[in-house]
Image (cartoon, grey):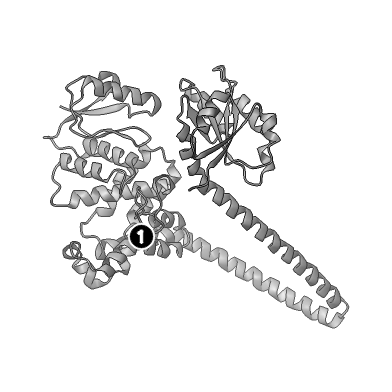
Amino acid sequence: MDTPVSVLYIGESSLAAEIAGDPGVQVRLVASPREAAAVETRPDILVMVPEFDTDGHAADMVRKWIQLAKLDRFVFSPGIFCGVPASLPRDIRLKILEAGCDRLLDFPFLPGEIRIKAGQYNEKYLLAQQQHADSRALEKSFAYLDRFKSELKDVKTELVEEKTSLNLALKQVQEMTGERRRLKQALADVKKNLGENMAGFSRVLITLIRSRVEKNRGHAERVAGVAEFLGREMGLDENRLEDLLKAAMLHEVGLLFMSEAFLSDKEQKQSNLSAYDRTMMRQHPVKGADLLDNCPGFEPEARIIRSLNEWSDGTGYPEGLKRQHIPVASKILAGADELETLRDRPDIKGPEALLAALEDLAGARLDPVIAGLLGKYVVTRLASESFKVRGVGLEQLEPGMKLGAALFTDSGTKLFSANTELTREAINKVIQYSREYPVDEIVYIKV
């Protein structure tokens, strides 16, 4: 049987009794933060249930409770959960999180909710342990360096007593200083030339990809166009957007390692790859990233491309990262590349087939948020004359309307698939979800 989650509970006792009913939770109830400070054993989770008001002082109360509980006495701080009313305004919720709370629990919360959510902090706890161990190792390394410096000082003292050796050493130091100056200048010249040639080197790689790898000319440019749309929709700043677009242009650089025979017959081999070829195809983003890592100035693009084949459900490569742990830029690039791959498939014709294929990928290959934005891209940028949609606001939705694209919340929850005919009940569900998990302001309806 798994070890129960230990919970230190500060607040109203009847809620604590309900939580204690869960066999997977071990609860210790205290009346105040000061009593919590006297508890010697570190709990897994500290649950605080203060009496909240909505005048803006809730965050100050939470911050004060955390200070009074003296959680910093533990080497690894426990997770801090705070029970709040469901009606608490969102700006106050944000301030509570900024005050040091890890997770908010809306009243009424189920007894098992704390146990389930506490599991999400195991990884954080393990990382904290690793960081602590690394810090101890670093301290030992510094101590070794201090001893080494002390010994070096003693050696220098002995050398001072030998005038002849010292004069020779000084002469050598002067020569080395001159050489260091020359090397420093040479390095500066190399860096300057490298900076001037980075754009040219990038063009060389892109030309190689186009001539040797790309099956359809313009693939990289189209992927970059979709990636730019997604990046702007997700609010990337200009520097991150620039790195994303460069990565889009270079995302197939790893395929340059494939054999000429494979690339010349790539289209025919896609449906009948050997185990070796499948492995190479799966690894090509990592190989491309390794290549770019060795090219100064291309490190951001390498980081983005390395996670190109990570799947939202954690079944991807190379690290099996799940949705929230995959870099945002990598998720965007993966979505843009998948959309262009779908457009090249002969069995997918027209926007409706494309939207259906994207829905199938949501939550598995693609992050649901990315899949939702790709649906928006299809209906606004790729729709043909025969596929007509119009954008309406939530307040304009009426029964009988048919969705032109799947409807997702900003958190990635899919509410309805494309072609769903809206009922009054469905519209009320959308409006209700939007209060807690905002939905895109524009909903695309078939004309």
Which image quadrant for residue 12? top right
Q: Nearer the viewer, residue 263 or 440?
A: 440
Q: Is 445 left, or right, of 26 in this rendering?
A: left
Residue tagged by mark 1? 285
Which residue appears at 53% of the width and 24% of the height?
Answer: 92
Image coordinates of residue 182 in percent, x first then y, are 62, 70
Which image quadrant for residue 209? bottom left
Within 10 Å of the Cα at label 1, are there few (<14), some (14-19), or many (20+) other Cα atoms?
A: many
Q: Is 233 left, or right, of 358 in this rendering?
A: right
Q: Is 62 left, or right, of 361 in this rendering?
A: right
Image coordinates of residue 43 in percent, x first then y, are 60, 40
Residue at disc 1, secondary structure: helix
Image coordinates of residue 110 in percent, x first then y, are 45, 30
Identity, as a three-letter code, of the amino acid under mark 1: Pro
Image coordinates of residue 198 in percent, x first then y, are 43, 60
Q: Is residue 95 visible?
A: no
Q: Is residue 200 visible?
A: yes
Q: Nearer the viewer, residue 75 or 340?
A: 75
Query: Is 223 situated above or below 355?
Result: below
